[in-house]
Amino acid sequence: MRVLGISDNHNAGAALTIDGRLVAAVNEERLTRAKNASGFPERAIAETLRVGGLTPAEIDLVVVAGEITPSFFLRRAPRFHQRAKAGSGQFGALFSLYIYYQVAARRLGWPYRLDRRWSQRLLARRLAALGFRCPVEMRDHHQAHAEGAFLCGPFARATIITADAMGDGVTATVSVGRADGRIERVYAQSGLAALNPYYSRVTALLGFTPLRHEGKVTGLAAYGDPARLAPLFRRQLHFCGPGFSTLGHPLRDHPRLGWRRQLWAEPPADVAAGCQRALEEAVTAFVDYWVRRTGVADVALAGGIFENVKLNQRVRELASVAAVSVFPHMSDGGLAAGAALAASGGRPAPLPTIYLGASYDEETIRAELTRAGVRYERPADIADAVAEALAAGEVVPRFTGAMEYGPRALGHRSIYFRADDPSANDWLNKRLGRSEFMPFAPMTTDEAADRFFVGLDGARFAARFMTMCFDCTAEMKRVAPGCVHVDGTARPQVVRREDCPDAHAILTAGERRGRPPILLNTSFNMHEEPIVMSPADAIGAWRAAGFRCLAIGPFLATAGAA
């Protein structure tokens, strides 16, 4: 069975499954070059089918992840939706009304069914215009999150936790996944949960862009004193079994009114630290409660809340939890994959590859280098050439193979540098036009990982995709200070040879030169741009950053005219 999954909300995208196997997945932002692009993902649909080698007429079913999120009105008026998300409407009165509408529609039933039916008809017409002749089904937002977390994870049975701002009137769910692929929901909390806008509102209050810069707040939190302001945040968000505290009057959440006005005069690091502490306490209490209720100690996580790598570490550290996996594309950008897998009858199995996007052959890359007037050579061993350049102190962007699916660069669209320079976080961020508080992530081989990180047991699957922090060993702090945060943690990518042979070869080539098998790895893009997709994107970002070397396909390019 050939199933196309699509999502048309935040970070819209498409995913293709064939007989229960995920074969292609792309998000719209990589094609439009607009970060977190939302709306009907027409380009992502076309690209996903191209990667999968199918036409619209060959698809048996299209499943849409999100029944009334976005609502029918927003699907009819995507420009209004995008303007509202970009402006003050993100957390203004319209946002509050949207929350209440979604929750009320779900509770009453008939408005939900009506909105879903209208949305289904609208999307079916748009898909028919693209050549699709198959049925179109709608799937619950959090169900798609749960399906991605479980069906792509390492557990035959799991407690599945989903949590995000809101989808289809719900903020958080708990389910139990079984070996035959069945997922039984045992709890759902409405979109009125205080968890809903919690972290993003603080992100905005600190002057960052919500739904984009939450990671900056996570990094900044390590520099503050959580004890000072955590009590204030706990009054807003706390666990009160079986779920979370609920939202108060909308005016209480206005950044200039209510409890938040007390934060304006506080040091930003303390605000971030208090916010992070309260989030960790509430979510870990929620997970602990439900793991004990279900009796299933393996936990699968998905939803935008679990982009927070420090929170994921705290979940893994719970005594009641045996092991944790995080869906690699945990936020709304990954909904299409979960929906498509479930609709095609997928069974739980570890995701065999995260490299599900576009790839480019040698001749295409050569032609683009020539067109751009770039000087390049084709070394006998590109991994050895990259290792040599890194040993000489060069920053080396790496473009190879199929594009990663999800928010992390995992070796196919990455920028590498030696991990022993503690100043790299400052000067390299400046070159890339970024401002970050958390250091760049380390990449190491699976064979060496236990030398550098504490507590990998029970989380090795998550470590493959850079979705969790770990405490660093003394050796890690000594040999890779450029990747260790002020709190002594790092968020690694642990590379298995079978997952990413190219990155593994570069790491081992460095080890042959007497260096530790560990590198600084950050995404290949300039600030506020999506990760590069094509050779042209890669060359443009490389030139904008002003690096001397570029390893692209089998070629090593150097700055200067050809």
Image (cartoon, rainbow, N blue to C red):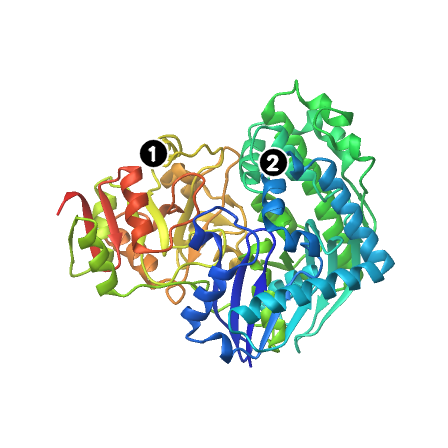
Residue 174 shown left or right of residue 471 in the figure: right
Q: Which mark is residue 545?
A: none
- Residue 520: x percent and y percent? 37, 44
Q: Identify residue for label 2.
A: 87
Residue 198: x percent and y percent?
A: 70, 39
Of labels 2 and 1, earlier in sequence is: 2
Q: Residue 527, located in which quarter of the rendered image?
A: top left
Q: Characterize the local packing of mark 1: few (<14), some (14-19) or many (20 or more) Cα atoms within 10 angstroms.
A: some
Give SS at disc 2.
loop
* Residue found 76% across the figure and 49% down from its top: 191
Q: Nearer the viewer, residue 448 or 432?
A: 432
Q: Position of residue 12 (x, y in %)?
A: 55, 56
Number of dots carrying numbers: 2
**Quadrant the N terminus occupies:** bottom right
Q: Say left or right for 205 vs 258.
A: left
Note whether residue 350 is visible: no
Q: Which residue is mark 1?
A: 431
* Between marks 2 and 1 in the image, the one whose residue lies nearer the viewer: 2
* x, y percent for residue 505: 29, 59
Camera-nearest residue between 168 and 320 = 168
Q: Secondary structure at mark 1?
A: helix
Q: Nearer the viewer, residue 17 or 479?
A: 17
In the rendered structure, which amino acid carries the disc numbered 2? Gly
